[in-house]
Amino acid sequence: KKHAVIVVAEGCGDTILHSDSAQKDAGGNKVLADVGPYLKDEITSHFKTLGLPVSIKYIDPTYMIRSVPPNAYDGLYCATLAQQAVHGAMAGYSGISVGKVDERYVMLPIHAVTSQGTRSVDIKGRMFERLIAATKQPSFAA
């Protein structure tokens, strides 16, 4: 199908891009060299030299997904998901996503995940209110 999804961990570029900045972000963490735009430019340049068309959609969700500081469970969960994704890739699987189902980490075919149709959340429901309370976000429900 001639397409790919590339996921890059924040901070992985520190080995190839050096940031002399001593700046800190809002969370007090060192501002890391931004490898995303670098990789996008390198991949675009590579395809251009090969004379092949390429379309890259670069999305940096770094701060979009953070609403509260991560705890130890979050770190372990993300590390396990990443390991499972790498295991799937190294085993030659494509078209999969990893997740947790009934307390087991599983590889799910993308079509099985996306064919279920869209889901919606009742923003006036109890589960949404629990989410808002757990993540300490303001409630905008009227």
Image: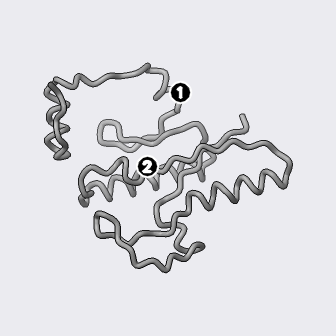
Left or right: 70 in relation to 2 = left
Residue 133 x, y percent position in the rendering: 13, 41
The residue to which callout 2 is attached is 61
Q: Is residue 55 above or below residue 24?
A: above
Look at 63% across and 46% down and name the residue there. Answer: 92
Closer-to-camera residue (35/127): 35
Camera-nearest residue between 119 and 19: 19
Mark 2: few/some/many CA within 10 Å (<14, 14-19, 20+): few
Residue 85: give x, y in percent of width and height: 50, 49
- Quadrant housing the N terminus: top right
Q: Is residue 126 above or below residue 103?
A: above
Amino acid type at circle 1 is: His
State the residue position of label 1: 111
**Lower sequence index among marks 1 and 2:** 2
Image location (x, y in percent) of residue 82: 45, 54
* Quarter assignment of residue 80: bottom left
| Relative height, residue 110 to residue 71 (above, below) | above
Q: Amino acid at mark 2?
A: Pro
Residue depth check, mark 1 versus mark 2: number of the one nearer the observer: 2
